[in-house]
Image: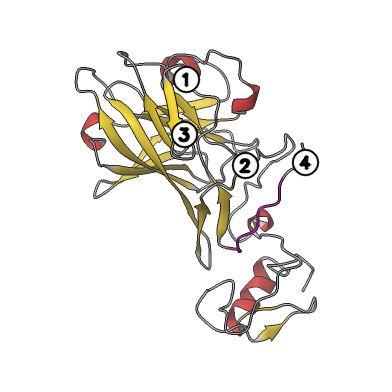
Amino acid sequence: MPAMPHMCDVTCLGPLTFHSRAGDRIQLSEGDRRAERIGDTFRDGLVFSSRPVRVNERIRVCVQKHACKWKGALRVGFTNLSPSARTLPLPPMAIPNLTSVHGHWAAVVPEAFSPVGSELQFWVSNSGKLFWEGHNTGCHKLLSGVDLSKPLWAVIDLYGQTCSIFLLGSEKKDWVFTRRSCPAPAPLIEPPPSFNPDFLSPCENREDVVSSPNREIPAGSSCVACMVKEPTVTLRCGHRCLCSPCTLKVRQHIGSCPLCRQQI
C-alpha cells in the first residue's frame, strides 16, 4: 500500500501511537495511545512505537495504573526489528527475552521513579546511548551501544507493577525550534518498508524538513522556522516562509526551502 503523505508544518514529527502488534495481555485504546496489561500477570506487556523514531526524539509516557502485588516496573528501549515483521505471540518480557536477541536494547526504570501519575521520557542519543528522564529526577543513562545505522522502533514493556500507560507523544529539540509528534490520522498508515530516517545531527538532518510543495504561507503567518517573526524573504522557489535571520541559518545548515526542498 502506498504511503499516505502527512503534512502539518515543519515542526511536526508526524503521527505516533502504539503499534497494533503487541503483547498477549495488552489492550490498546484511545486511538492506540493507551496500553493496558490485563489479567492476573506481571508479563506479556510488550508494546512498540507505530513508526521508526529519530535520534534524540524523546518518547513521552504517563503511568496510569499500578498493580502493587508485583515487583518491578516499566522497561524501555529500542529495536531495529519492525513490529510488523514479528511473529505472534510476542516474547513475554523485554528483559531477557528481547535483549538476548541481536538488535534489541532495553533497561529498567526503577519502581521509585514510575508511580501512578508520573511522566517520563526516554530517547537514544547521537552516540547510541539510551537515556530516560522523569519529572524532577534529572537525566539518567541506562545503557550504550544502540545501533543507529538502521531504523529504530521504541520498545516499552508494561512489566510488574506497571499495568497501564498513556503515550503523550514525542518531541525533538532542533537548532531552531522543538518539533513534536501529532495525533494519528484515521486511518493510520504505517511507513513503507523502505522508510529509513536519517540519523544525522539536527543541523545536517535534511529528512527533518517536511515536504509540502503546494502549501502557501498565508498573510500574517509566522516564519516556519522560529514561529515568531514575520516571513519577509521570498526564496528562489517562490515561497515566502522565512524571516531574514532564519533564512541565513536555513541556507547554511539545510540549503533548501522548508516547504518544497528546492535548493536556495
Residues under labels 2 and 1: Cα distance? 22 Å
**Which residue is nearer to you in this view: 86 or 24?**
24
Q: Which residue is mark 2?
A: 187
Q: Quadrant of the N terminus?
A: top right
For the residues bearing labels 4 and 1, Cβ distance under 8 angstroms? no
Residues under labels 3 and 1: Cα distance? 26 Å
Residues under labels 2 and 3: Cα distance? 36 Å
Amino acid type shown at disc 1: Gly
- Magenta segment boundaries in residue numbering: 4-10
Q: Which residue is mark 1?
A: 23
- Residue 6 within the magenta-colored segment of the rendering: yes
Amino acid type shown at disc 4: Pro
**For discs 4 and 2, the disc positioned in front in the rendered view:** 2
- Callout 4 secondary element: loop
Q: Position of residue 169 (x, y in %)?
A: 45, 47
User: Going by the image, does 262 lie left or right of 19?
Assistant: right
Coloration mode: secondary structure
**For discs 2 and 1, the disc positioned in front in the rendered view:** 2
Classed neighbour count for the residue bearing mark 2: other residues with Cα under 10 Å, few (<14), some (14–19), many (≥20): few
- Callout 1 secondary element: loop
For the residues bearing labels 3 and 1, Cβ distance under 8 angstroms? no
Classed neighbour count for the residue bearing mark 3: other residues with Cα under 10 Å, few (<14), some (14–19), many (≥20): some
Which numbered dot is residue 2?
4
Q: Which residue is mark 3?
A: 144
User: Going by the image, does 99 lie left or right of 235?
Assistant: left
**For discs 3 and 1, the disc positioned in front in the rendered view:** 1
- Residue 115 within the magenta-colored segment of the rendering: no
Which numbered dot is residue 5?
none
- Please say whether residue 4 is visible from this viewpoint: yes
> In the image, what residue occupies the spot 58% across and 33% down?
147
- Please say whether residue 81 is visible from this viewpoint: no
